[in-house]
Image (cartoon, rainbow, N blue to C red):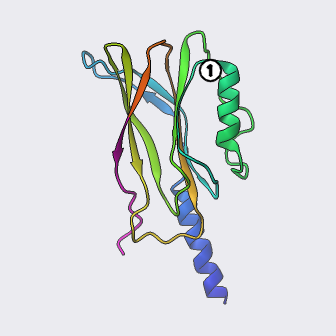
Amino acid sequence: MKLIFAAAGLLTLACLGSSSAATGHRRPKPGTGQIAFVTLVQRAIPGQQGDQVREVVRDTASWKDLWFRLRERDSGVLSHQQPAVDFDKNMVIAVAMPTQSCISKVAIQGIVHQPGALVVNVLEAPPAPNCVCIVSQRPIHAVTVPRTADPVRFVVTQGVTTCGGR
């Protein structure tokens, strides 16, 4: 029985270990139309239930509302207070996958300014079929970009998150 609990604990840690936070700047290549962005949060939240999110936020009240929805039922992984954003200069782009059965990730890979629109390139990587976890998770990624009134379009590429050599 102790062996079962030890194995369950290791599986849980493996799933939680894939839920690393990431912050940083994404600098564009000159002349490509790419937009620089800063990651506010990128996590896979263990045990969280939730739907797909693809949102653009241009004001504090909407950001507070979205942050509340991203935190809802997250068992304290995300801070109660949303990251500060200067909405006079910036806006937030956020994506989340629906709850996944195991390790998974979502990533804003790039943002390109095209005539009359921003195109957000998103990678969604659900768990590989051989993954076995005891904790589900919901991956999210939120970034800031310079403010624009242009519409935003999301282009999604499907990937897969591997979970070992089984």
The quadrant holding residue 134 is bottom right
Q: Is residue 80 above or below residue 162?
A: above
Q: Is residue 64 above or below residue 46?
A: above
The quadrant holding residue 16 is bottom right
Q: Is residue 111 magenta?
A: no
Q: Is residue 5 above or below residue 20?
A: below
Q: Main secondary structure of the magenta part?
A: loop
Dot 1: what SS?
A: loop
Q: Is residue 30 above or below residue 119?
A: above
> Measured from the top left, where is residue 25 in percent x and y?
45, 27
Residue at the disc numbered 1 = 85
Which stretch did the figure color magenta? 155-166
Q: Quadrant of the N terminus?
A: bottom right
- The residue at 27%/17% (across/down) is 30
- The residue at 39%/64% (across/down) is 128
> Measured from the top left, where is residue 96 in percent x and y?
52, 43
Q: Amino acid at mark 1?
A: Val
> Measured from the top left, where is residue 72 in percent x and y?
71, 45
Q: Quadrant of the C terminus?
A: bottom left
Report the side of 159 relative to 18 (left or right).
left
Q: Is residue 161 magenta?
A: yes
- The residue at 56%/52% (across/down) is 138
Instruction: Name the one closer to the observer, 47 or 26.
Output: 47
> Measured from the top left, where is residue 49 in percent x and y?
63, 54
